[in-house]
Image (spheres, helix red, strand yellow):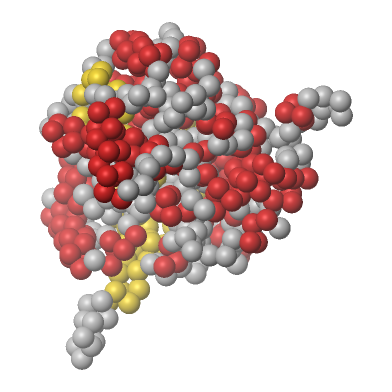
Amino acid sequence: MDIQLNIHQTHHSVADFPKIKNYLIDHFKSIKQDDQKLQLHLFPELFLTGYPLQDLCLNRSFILAYQKLIADINYWSEHENNCNKTSTLLLMGGLDYTFDNNKDNDNDNWPLEIKNVIYKLVPGEKLTPIYSKILLPNYDIFDEKKYFTPGETPQILQWNNKHLALMICEDMWPSSAHKVNPLDEIDKYIHEKKINLDLIINLSAGPYHINKNWIRINQGQYISKRFKAPFAYVNRVGGEDEILFDGQSFIVNEDNFIIKANAFKAQLLSINLTDTSSLNTQGTQYAQNTHHNSKVKIKDNIWAQLYSPEIVIPTAPANTDLNKKLPILPEWSNGECQEAIDALIFGLNEYAQKSNFNNFLIALSGGMDSCLTLALAHFCSKAKGRSNTTSNTIKVEAIFMPSKYSSTLSYQLSKDLCNNLNIPLHYLPIKFLHSSCQKAIEETFKLPFVGLADENIQSRLRGMLLYARSNQTNALVINTSNKSELAVGYSTMYGDSVGGISLLGDLYKTEVYQLANYINHAYNNLIPQEVISRAPSAELRENQTDMMSLPPYERLDVILEGILSYHMSASELINLGFSKEEVLKTFKLYYNSEYKRKQFGPIIKIKSKSFGFGYRVPINKDNNFYSI
């Protein structure tokens, strides 16, 4: 009998138990039974709760609500489900709690053990946990060993004479970082039992970064070839604060790419596993093209993959210009630029919806970062799918807040951009507020108010006015700082570092320019060209430019990538050709700025390593080792 495989690429908030239950019930009420086919329905990892949970999985109210969900699904299955019991099977991710039921213990019903499991649901029966995740990731944004108990044995589910190998997310990524290899365990099991696999299933909650999907597809093809069976990857969709889940579920059969779901959209994929020949040619071409364009290399150890710098070391004759010989960041293709834009739009939309914001507010300076941020906010306002809010319309607003150092050109460029985007621009000068602050502080403390203190007060006045307007309109303030500035502390606390969410915090300055150039190429020159071509400046003093305080961004960004990969020391960067002075200066700016980053808002993560949840460095430490 053929298998009708149904991949449910779902999209719901963490702990949205009513929506989870309604999705199951409403969907299966509409199913038309086909006695000639087996119906296999697959749902993502932790479908029943959402992911990531962090300490939420220990919360008593959460546990009680989750237990009620399980009871409701069991009641529905046993009493109201009309699906064919013998030919229908649901596999979904969830939590399996073991509680301390000792009556003499003050911690009665405290979870003794939590497992990340696959539940089997056969119509007419209760949910049954049948497999526990073996490999628990514990790096970067992952901390599953803090909460979950690992499984120990593989699971080959026999169903209607079909053999289905089960895995959860990390189980498909064995490496030297893990002591157990689930693929080897499956191999050993099927050889001992003398069985052939009909399908390999991976239920996943796999976070996104640029080019991540090709890595998944490559690994899926490897597993499929190893076991000579189709491989089905089921991923969730969602923006959970800074972490994005992109979906892009897929099925491969060895080198043949069968089908793929959309990125960043809920979708139901249905396919007859015995009728894939017409899709094989197209699928193989897709996989080959993606492989050809990708710069990502798969390494044995997952830590090495995350923490190796993404830099290109060019070969050049000894007599060429210094900058031409130095390492550079990889240049993004048009496809990668659009992928980054799609991810940022999705992440902003998710954060705004789940935080109940329908208005965006940006401080527009006429500089590159704020102009790109406004363009991305504009794209987000035009995106479809704001189903979680009472309003489907996002209003975007910009404020230009000049000081006595702001140029006329900055205002003109800001006006031009807002005209291009059809966004209202408010003119709110700070020079009189600035003068009043200067006078009050000098009269109170009997000291001249100059230098950095005078520069920072301008930025903080803008932050104050920005949030005053935010309070009036209930608008989400979007931060405009980039990764280069964050890394070296080139921002003012409670000034230009304010904002509820950061769009550019995972983009180096040179990547900001790449995206801006791509937007002008693909979207009919939305951003005034002079924004891109003129020297970047904070305009907090006369004739100021960024390069007065920082190395040129084409060198700074590569040094920072080496540092942030946790892989390259000062001496290694110097050996690549960077000047000792610039390297040591960058290290000093970096380690002296940790206190600022700790107070920064969430950063939408689109690369393998960012300054977000997965970045954990002490504020106070001896920093002498950085210069070694």
Left or right? Give the position of 317 relative to 498.
right
Q: Position of residue 110 (x, y in %)?
A: 25, 76
Residue closest to the eye, 499 or 223: 499
Q: Residue furthest bottom?
A: 104
Indicate the quadrant containing the C terminus: top left, top right, bottom left or bottom right.
Answer: bottom right
Q: Residue furthest right?
A: 318
Residue at x 38% of width, y 33% of height: 480
Q: Is residue 491 visible?
A: no
For the image, the number of numbered tags is: 0
Q: Is residue 108 visible?
A: yes
Residue at x 57% of width, y 31% of height: 547
Residue closest to the eye, 619 or 139: 619
Left or right? Give the position of 130 relative to 65.
right
Residue at x 36% of width, y 47% of height: 447
Indicate the quadrant containing the N terminus: top left, top right, bottom left or bottom right.
Answer: top left
Quarter of the image holding residue 229? top right
Residue at x 39% of width, y 24% of height: 405
Q: Relative to 574, does residue 329 appear above or below in the rendering?
A: above
Residue closest to the eye, 517 or 339: 517
Left or right? Give the position of 388 relative to 553.
left
Q: Relative to 9, does residue 131 appear above or below in the rendering?
A: below
Q: Position of residue 157 (x, y in %)?
A: 44, 57
Residue closest to the eye, 288 or 325: 325
Q: Position of residue 607 (x, y in %)?
A: 51, 40
